[in-house]
């Protein structure tokens, strides 16, 4: 079982020719809504990858709730641990330019109402994989990591969005998944040595007894676990929207680990899935199914 503890949002997406400068107003070319939130995205990705998934999170009692959970309800994910509160469902306001790059502002809404009791009630048992991110209160991320340790579950922390106060959590989990910007920020906080990112990644491996995965966008991914270092390129694509690529990577990686795939195979599958996500607009609607990812 993969247990995802995280955010549930509705994405409000505007397509623009280019991203505006500070203080600038520009015209958009299209608008759409899409289910989102890093927790919900990663849960759907793991479910579409073929893994049994339970999502632990909170949605509001507004009209956005049904839209935010629509695709997850169509999947086989267990949503019995999604609570409803008297607040707005989380919202992400996204602008996507022609190149596929984006800027995002997140309003947590109901996600801020996740409690330790809800995390305690999560169906975490020995051998489960627990996937965490930074769009829920950080004390609850730390609490979930403690539960993983006590229950013998495998913990994966996706460090998006970057939060300075979470640097101390990186060494407490089994797997860390960070994009290149997040890693560089944490490397400075942790005082990792080296003149290059590669050297700082190696220094991380010497200091911490876990697996570090750094996603590099179009350049692929690098991972290091003890003396083992893996570098994989990404497929060459013309991206339409990169919004959900990182979350798809995380969900597929967790699903592959759950089936016993070795690290290099799990990474390769996750990279393929993340790249395919960039070929469609939106976050959850763009997440590919396993047959697309695993096609020869």
Image (cartoon, helix red, strand yellow):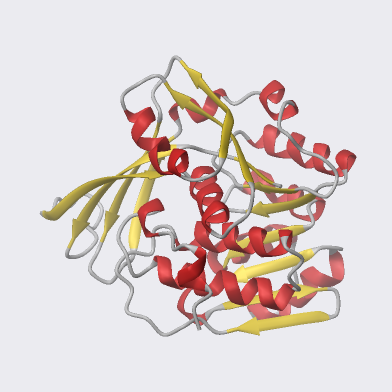
Of 65 and 26, nearer the camera is 65
Q: Position of residue 52 (x, y in %)?
A: 64, 48
Of 160 and 60, nearer the camera is 60
Relative to 116, residue 43 above or below: below
Determine the residue located farthest toward the top in the rendered image.
Answer: 86
Of 72 and 239, nearer the camera is 72
For this view, does 82 lie left or right of residue 141? left
Relative to 141, residue 267 above or below: below
Circle count: 0
Measuring 59% from the left and 73% from the top, which residue is drawn there? 269
Q: Position of residue 68 (x, y in %)?
A: 39, 36
Task: Inspect this view and state whether residue 200 appears.
Answer: no
Q: Position of residue 92 (x, y in %)?
A: 37, 42
Measuring 61% from the left and 62% from the top, which residue is drawn there? 178
Q: Position of residue 88 (x, y in %)?
A: 38, 23
For this view, does 99 lie left or right of residue 163? left
Measuring 85% from the left and 66% from the top, which residue is drawn there? 207
Measuring 69% from the left and 33% from the top, which residue is drawn there? 139
Task: Inspect this view and state whether residue 51 appears.
Answer: yes
Relative to 199, residue 6 above or below: above
| Residue 183 picture quarter | bottom right
For this view, does 152 lie left or right of residue 193? right
């Amino acid at each position: 079982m993969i247990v995802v503890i995280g955010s549930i949002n509705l994405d409000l997406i505007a397509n623009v020719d280019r991203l505006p400068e500070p203080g600038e107003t520009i015209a958009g070319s299209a608008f759409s809504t899409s289910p989102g939130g890093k927790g919900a995205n990663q849960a759907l990705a793991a479910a579409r990858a073929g893994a049994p998934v339970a999502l632990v999170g909170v949605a509001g009692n507004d009209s956005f709730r049904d839209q935010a959970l629509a695709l997850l309800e169509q999947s086989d994910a267990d949503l019995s641990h999604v609570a409803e509160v008297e607040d707005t469902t989380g919202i992400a306001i996204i602008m996507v330019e022609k190149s596929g790059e984006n800027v995002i502002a997140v309003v947590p809404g109901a996600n801020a109402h996740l409690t330790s009791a809800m995390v305690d009630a999560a169906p975490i048992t020995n051998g489960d994989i627990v996937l965490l991110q930074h769009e829920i209160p950080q004390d609850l991320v730390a609490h979930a990591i403690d539960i993983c340790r006590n229950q013998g579950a495998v913990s994966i922390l996706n460090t998006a969005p970057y939060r300075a106060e979470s640097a101390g959590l990186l060494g407490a989990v089994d797997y860390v998944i960070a994009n290149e910007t997040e890693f560089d920020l944490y490397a400075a906080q942790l005082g990792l040595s080296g003149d290059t990112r590669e050297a700082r990644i190696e220094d991380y491996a010497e200091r911490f007894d876990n697996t570090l995965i750094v996603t590099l966008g179009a350049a692929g991914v690098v991972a290091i676990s003890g003396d083992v270092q893996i570098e994989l390129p990404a497929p060459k694509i013309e991206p339409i929207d990169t919004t959900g690529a990182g979350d798809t990577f995380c969900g597929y990686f967790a699903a592959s680990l759950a089936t016993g795939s070795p690290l290099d195979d799990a990474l390769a599958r996750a990279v393929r899935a993340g790249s395919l996500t960039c070929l469609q607009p939106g976050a959850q609607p763009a997440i590919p199914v396993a047959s697309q990812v695993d096609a020869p």
